[in-house]
Image (cartoon, grey):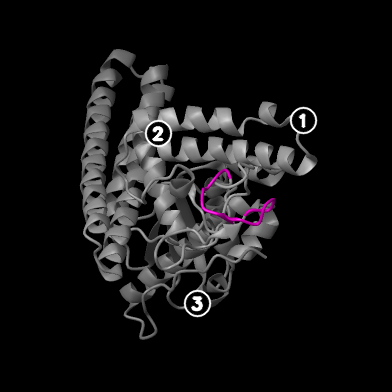
Amino acid sequence: MSVTQTQRDETGRAAATKCWNCQAPAAATHFCAACGKIQPLPEGADYFVFFGLPEKLSLDSTQLEAQFHKLSWKLHPDNFVRAGDFERDLSLNRSSELNDAYRTLREPISRVEYLLLRRGLRKEGTTKQQAPPELLEEVFELNESLDQLREARAEGADLAALREPLDAAQKNFRQKLEEVDAELAGIAREWDFALDTAADEAKKQTLLARMNEVLNRRSYIRNLVAGVQKELAEA
Amino acid sequence: MAYSDKVIEHYNNPRNVGSLDKKDPNVGTGLVGAPECGDVMKLQMKVNPDTRIIEEAKFKTFGCGSAIASSSLATEWVKGKTVEEALAIKNTDIVRELSLPPVKIHCSVLAEDAIKAALSDWKKKQGDAEAKPAEPATAASH
């Protein structure tokens, strides 16, 4: 998360700055439209702005990849070997930002996480997330059942006999993960629709909160899937 | 990221792992979770209703080394303390004792929340007038 955390203005656009070289209002995100010089990332620009994308959750991954390659080539430090220190540093920073931006937006889950982070719902370490008690009960029980299989194995139980409950557990957890992913995808579509139809802020906040809640649930299930996978690999 | 020696020690030799009878009126159970990382922590305490001293404490945590160490340490600390003394334990005390790095502070918050939740459950069972929902601890980094 190396990109500046400055918020967008009300219109959702990054604040316009002047070109450091020719003082022209730098309209483009990466290069000055007037003199063509590489620019620092505009104040408040996020990863979506970086790729010239709206803040939507559905995106064409082929197009994103093509744009990533194009920008990698344009921002590459090799193009700035004869430029001054300032431009060389910009090229290095911008290339590293580009990699972060691409890695973050490429995966649907990290894309949602990033949106929530930008919108202030997932500040690392400060905002405490709450889990509903029923979910905790369920997750704890699922973990216990996995733990029992683990202990049985440690005590030398017949591996073939354990395989079956482990397989069943894996099927169960994977199904839960699919359900939660489908739910998240559904809300993501609602989010995109809300942006398309210029829905009010309250509606957007509701959708963000729902995505946050589903994402929290997802992290418990993801751990269970990883746990059972580890056991199966060793069984 | 390297774990501190104390975290590793608690991780390898966790104290008081297990469970107490949830239905026992003198046993308080706290079940808390950190959705950011998917950790779940259960902490149980058996309190003497006359002396209000915590006589037994057990935990079970599914999570990272720091979460396990934080809850293990919490059970060690609350044993022999009164309910009020146990409630005074702050996540920052755990951070200091285990030298937790900033990214693992939420594990200590989880342990503090678990103590509060367990004692709030105990108070509720006792019909204690001061019983109220556990106040979630706020993440303090120093």
The numbered mark at residue A64 is 2
Give the amino acid type for the residue marked by disc 1 in the picture: Arg
Q: Nearer the viewer, mark 2 or mark 1?
A: 1
**Mark 3 closeness class: few <14, some 14–19, many ≥20 residues within 10 Å:** few
The numbered mark at residue B51 is 3
Residue under circle 1?
A82
**Mark 2 closeness class: few <14, some 14–19, many ≥20 residues within 10 Å:** some
In the image, what residue occupies the spot 68% across and 46% down?
Answer: B6
Which of the pair A178/B26 is nearer the observer?
A178
Relative horizontal placement of residue A91, taking residue B124 as reference (left or right): right
State the SS at label 1.
Answer: loop
Q: Is residue A202 something that shows in the picture?
A: yes
State the SS at label 3.
Answer: loop
Up the image or down, A216 lies above or below B78; here it is above
Which of the pair A94/A27 is nearer the observer?
A27
Q: Position of residue B132 (x, y in %)?
A: 37, 79
Which of the pair B61/A134 is nearer the observer?
A134
**Residues in magenta, as a range:** A19-31
Q: Is residue B2 something that shows in the picture?
A: no
In the image, what residue occupies the spot 57% across and 69% down?
Answer: B81
Secondary structure predominantly adopted by residues drawn in magenta: loop
Give the amino acid type for the residue marked by disc 3 in the picture: Thr
Q: CA distance from mark 2 to mark 1?
A: 30 Å
Relative horizontal placement of residue A73, taking residue A225 as reference (left or right): right
Give the amino acid type for the residue marked by disc 2 in the picture: Leu
